[in-house]
Amino acid sequence: MDGEETEVSPEFRDDVNEGTEPDFDHLWGIVTDGLIGAVGGLVGTGSLTVGLLIAASLGVFDINEFATLAELTGLNVLFESNPAAVGYVLFLLTGMVMWPLLFASIGSYLPGEKYAVKGIPFGFVLWTGFAPAFYADYTGLALVLYLVLTLGAHFSYGFTLGAVFDYLGDRPETLV
């Protein structure tokens, strides 16, 4: 203290990071993880769509219910010719971006060893919002089929999303 110089640790020195290169490896890992999520969401939404098409072929799901998504966002005014298609594109984008981000965030807290298994309860949680939102006055056997088929489709979404996370997330350049 009397004439002594104290050493400042590197994290508190201003000149430590001067001239260093940005960490592009970390940035590349984030981009790669985002692509894994989008691919997982695309595959998952594809499997979910197959389940919904099976339900629609049995008369227990109406594809035109996707038009509600277009109406909620106001995009039905811009694309009046086919609001159900616009709604499906919004559904697809949600399945590719929002739900994979949430799954990546909470996946380690879900039960199961692999992400494919963790995706099943995740799909169930998503179904609890989907089932009432897309319900169209089904009764009796139609209601039972609607609930069972859409639940199975959401299990399929979660499982395939998690399976893609398991398969692609094991790569050394990812952060997952």
Image (cartoon, helix red, strand yellow):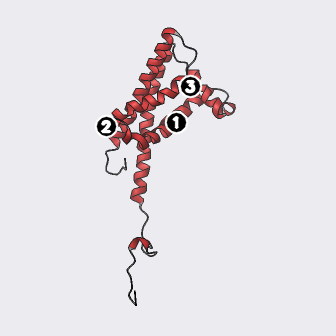
Name the spot of residue 13 as percent of width and height, x first.
43, 75
What's the CA distance linking mark 1 and mark 2?
A: 23 Å
Q: Amino acid at mark 3?
A: Ala
Q: Residue at x 55, y 29 (%)?
A: 88
Residue neighbourhood size for the residue with mark 2, other residues' Cα within 10 Å, grouped as few (<14), some (14–19), many (≥20): some
What's the CA distance linking mark 1 and mark 3?
A: 15 Å
**Element type where label 2 sits in the image:** loop
Question: Quadrant of the rendered structure where residue 121 is?
Answer: top left
Q: Residue furthest front?
A: 2
Mark drawn on residue 94: 1
What's the CA distance linking mark 3 and mark 2?
A: 30 Å
Residue with the mark numbered 3: 133
> Looking at the image, is mark 3 or mark 2 earlier in the sequence?
2
Which quadrant is home to the N terminus? Answer: bottom left
Q: Amino acid at mark 1?
A: Thr
Mark drawn on residue 114: 2
Q: Residue at x 51, y 15 (%)?
A: 60
**Element type where label 1 sits in the image:** helix
Residue neighbourhood size for the residue with mark 1, other residues' Cα within 10 Å, grouped as few (<14), some (14–19), many (≥20): some
